[in-house]
Image (cartoon, rainbow, N blue to C red):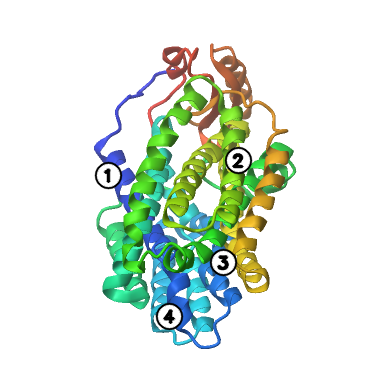
Amino acid sequence: MSSDYSDKMTALERRSTLSLGAVYAVRMLGLFMILPVFALYAEDFEKVTPLLIGLAIGAYGLTQALLQIPLGMLSDRIGRKPVIIGGLLVFAAGSAVAALADTLTWVIFGRALQGSGAIAAAVMALAADLTREEHRTKVMAAIGLSIGMAFSVALVAGPVLNHWIGVPGIFWLTAVLALVAIVIVLRFVPQPVSRRLQRDTRVVGSAIRRIVSDPELLRLDLGIFVLHMVLTANFIVIPVLLRDQAGLLPQHHWMLYFPVLLGSFLLMLPFIIVAEKRRKLKPVFVGAIALLAIVEFFFFRSGQGIYAMATGLLLFFTAFNLLEASLPSLVTKLTAPDVKGTSMGVFSSSQFLGAFAGGALGGVVLQTWGPQAVFTGSGMAILVWLLIGASMKNPRYLSSYLLNVGQLSSEHARIMVHELSRVEGVAEAVVIPEDSVAYLKVDRKILDESRLREFSTSPA
């Protein structure tokens, strides 16, 4: 077969990646900026309770989890951009409701409305429509990196903006950012020629039962659920402790978060290299879970002085960032090549459900037993995860690889699977005739890529 493969992304692919990454990052920035400041702001409401504070922080997670897969499927029917623009308008409306709210109940409603603008699946599907299969992994990694950067910026910017414009101002800014994202979609995101069924980014309804019955993937879904439950629960408590126990004024919280986040990234990098390059992913992964549990009990036992909090947060974010990077990598390694999109959809829903559970359960525990119990409960949840995670299989060090193979009959698809499986470094091959794509799992260390590219046709 002829090949029109290129190692370099086209200008359109680079533009698509940057613009969609910006849309995703702008939206997540608005959600994350509330995290380090809301618990302090909520104290000024009448009839405030820790449970209501927790629900206000985590409410977006419930609606996000419930709607992202249905809205992704809707984008298959009516188009990606209408769903993305509609979702951003709903997100902006939720931000405005939260900004105008004079009770925590209305804030909770606004946050839930924010989450209802669930555009993650539609953004990923649009990225698939606009990029060739050979570059899909790089594109998804770039969008994922934009989310991590948004979280880091939000944790530092939140306290600063709270001092300047207050939490209502942050909500208004979030609404404006959503409108900016709409402009990016309309002006800078290219219009796809057609919508394509791409199983590496799209949720396939018929595959959901197959995914949720896989014990290895369920371990990872549980992991991301616990990780974001603990993150959300901790931030119901940490901002208040930094003010009341560590003596750090709220407008100065960024002075702690900034060096802590920077230090955690530097500490994380060697472990990421060891995990991927030296194929020690399981021990690094399990070790990070153990470290996260230790940090929670450290918060419980050490008191909340400024140096103790700084040490705890440094270790917390080192473990958190390691796990946040490792979990999607493990999902990719353990998922069959033709259902990656469905696996990631269920995984992302578990993440957002974790954020909701962290807010709700963290609020109940804080209200009933106090702040120390939040750390103890988080530590116990992580220990359960550690026991389950330690029994995981050693992952095969395989990467996803997609090839555009053109229109094939069912018989030719079966022949191609056999031929692709004979290429050195190809561990699994699935060819779906109606997709025009071969979904592969490969060992890049031994992959005969030049031989593989011979099967690629010119992209449509």
Judge the density around disc 3: few (<14), some (14-19), many (≥20) Cα neighbours within 10 Å.
many
Q: Secondary structure at mark 2?
A: helix
* Callout 4 secondary element: helix
Q: Nearer the viewer, mark 2 or mark 3?
A: 2
Q: Which residue is mark 2?
A: 289
Query: Residue 135, percent across and down?
Result: 39, 32
User: Quarter of the image containing the C terminus?
Assistant: top left
Residue 319 lies, with reference to residue 336, above or below; the image says below
Which residue type carries mark 3? Thr
Task: Give the CA distance from mark 4 to mark 1.
Answer: 33 Å
Decide: few, some or many residues near mark 1? Use Cα within 10 Å; few <14, some 14-19, many ≥20: some
Residue 268 position, x and y percent, is: 44, 35
Give the distance between the C-alpha atoms of the residues marked 1 and 3, in whole angstroms.
30 Å
Q: Which tag, 2 or 3, sits closer to the chain's start?
A: 3
Q: Which mark is residue 63?
A: 3
Q: What residue does disc 1 label?
A: 15
Quarter holding the N terminus is top left
| Residue that carries the numbered disc 4 in the rendered image | 97
Q: What residue is shown at x 63% (from left), y 55% (from top)?
A: 378
CA separation in Å, label 1 and label 2: 37 Å
Q: Are marks 3 and 4 in contact (CB under 8 Å)?
A: no
Q: CA distance from mark 2 to mark 3?
A: 27 Å
Q: Position of residue 42 (x, y in %)?
A: 47, 77
Judge whether residue 23 can be spotted in this image: no
Among the two numbered marks 4 and 1 on one chain, the one whose residue lies closer to the N terminus: 1
- At label 1, which amino acid type do we have? Arg
| Mark closer to the chain start, 1 or 3 | 1
Q: Percent position (x, y) of residue 21?
A: 35, 49
Element carrying mark 3: helix
Dot 4 or dot 2, earlier in sequence:
4
